[in-house]
Image (cartoon, helix red, strand yellow):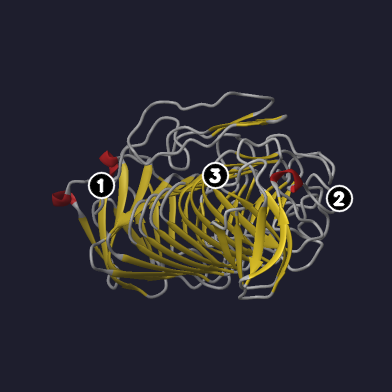
Amino acid sequence: MNALKNVKTWIAGGLAAVVLAVGGCTAGAVAASSTTTTSTTTTSTSSATLALTADHDTDSDHTWDTSAEVTIDLSNPTATDGVTVSDGVITITAAGAYRLSGTLADGQVVVDTEDSGNVYLILDNASITNSDGSAIVIDKADLALIVLADGTTNTVTDGSTYAATGDDDPNAAIWSDPDLTILGEGTLNVTGNYNDGIGGSDGLVIVSGTINVTAKDDGIKGKDYLVVKGGTITVTSGGDSLKSSNEDDSGLGYVSIVDGTVTLKSGDDGIDAWTAALVSGGTLTVAESVEGLEAKVVSISGGTVDVTSSDDGLNADDSASTAGDMEAQDGTLISISGGELTVTADGDGLDSNGDMTISGGTTIVYGPTNDGNGALDTNGTFTITGGTLLAGGSSGMAEAPSTDSSQKSLKFTVSAAAGATVEVKDSSGNTIATYTSPRQIASLVVSTDQVKEGETYTVYVNGTASGTTDTSQATSAGMGGGMGGGPGGGGGGGGQRP
């Protein structure tokens, strides 16, 4: 199994500390690192700050005494020390390591212990199905860890109806009240026929493994936080694919992808987080979604991200904000400081109901064709200080970064059919940007370190000159200032998140 770094104190997303200052015209960048650290990284503060607290994962929890493992044959379970069996329910009552193999055709594995110490559920070619409830319920434990034994394939399936349906009852095929860690080099296939695939009341960290989840509603949900540090994860969900929903603590309610390969096909949001959606490494593909990534703060600081959405690609929205539709939400931010981001959106490509900052990385947006949305849309300030930005889409609500930004931008009105090659050249004939869109575009915004103030640039479509511009003309169109309307526009955002 993988040995992950111990990122304990003030960790978030990817993970050192994250403190975002967003208010007025000041927007702090997201600090993110996958290396071991116990320090706190902060930015200058303004009218609001967002600090994300630590996850529970540590290297020392990734090992256990193999000689003391308790073996459970799911096909023919019997009571033993720390294990009771009754009417198809296997209950683990003591801390320790339990190796589960075989098939439990219609029953449940429950962890319920007051002991101090960890509980390890080692799935070793295990198949667990429950026709009228969660298949695995972790009710009480200091910390629960599901270990996927090397080279094994494990299956967990719940029923389409549950016997217990109260607000506090489990509602996922795998449910955990305490913090849960998933690791190992095996495969876990989870089917959530009733509601969620993997869910819980506290934090969830995925360290490694191949995890495939199909869920009627949300795919994988950690209420306090969901952190992906590695592995290969595929989620197909009727609701949100990855989710964190803690509304009560400003340091919780975040989803973070630090490493690994994550593929999402969602009937709603690819990632939905109350506080922050953070990507600092790995590969994230949101193949289908209504909105790709949605949270109060959306940060891309590393990795490769490819988003396809029927509405907004990235949407920064504070569902608790009382700001009006056309007003900037305090503390709401899209921050892009590294990595490679590609967005294909039928709504707004990048939509912040507050501020947006780009300081690094490569961002390519294939935006909407209707004038009620734009490739770029902000209600607050939009600044760019580094990186590469290419954003094409409709012209009605076309927006560019502020002309006060230290890195300058160009905005062209250009007519290009799907598949056309669009090039931007300087006055010497040097190509500074090339953009090939899978859909027609009427506008193109370009910002790179090669765009210079006072220079005139020409846009070419399939080799034919189609217009010129300079940095002074990179201003917003439509209603201006990112106050876009239309479905999912800057003013409307993504709506309230449950």
Please, is residue 142 above or below residue 152 in the view?
above
Q: Quadrant of residue 348?
A: bottom right
Residue type marked 3: Asp
The kind of secondary structure element at disc 1 is: loop
Residue type marked 2: Met
Question: Which residue sits furthest left?
Answer: 67
Mark 1 and mark 2: Cα distance apart in space: 52 Å
Label count reads 3
Please, is residue 279 above or below residue 357 in the view?
below
Residue type marked 1: Ala
Mark 1 and mark 3: Cα distance apart in space: 39 Å
Nearest to viewer (mark 3 / mark 2): 3
Q: Give the labeled residue for mark 3.
A: 449
Residue 292 in the image: state x and y as whole percent.
60, 59
Please, is residue 131 above or below residue 485 in the view?
below
Q: Is residue 205 left or right of residue 313?
A: left
Marks 1 and 2, the one that precedes in the sequence: 1
Mark 3 and mark 2: Cα distance apart in space: 28 Å
Given residues 330 and 383, the one toward you in this image is 383
Q: Could you tell me which quadrant the N terminus lies in?
A: bottom left
Residue 159 in the image: state x and y as whole percent.
52, 72
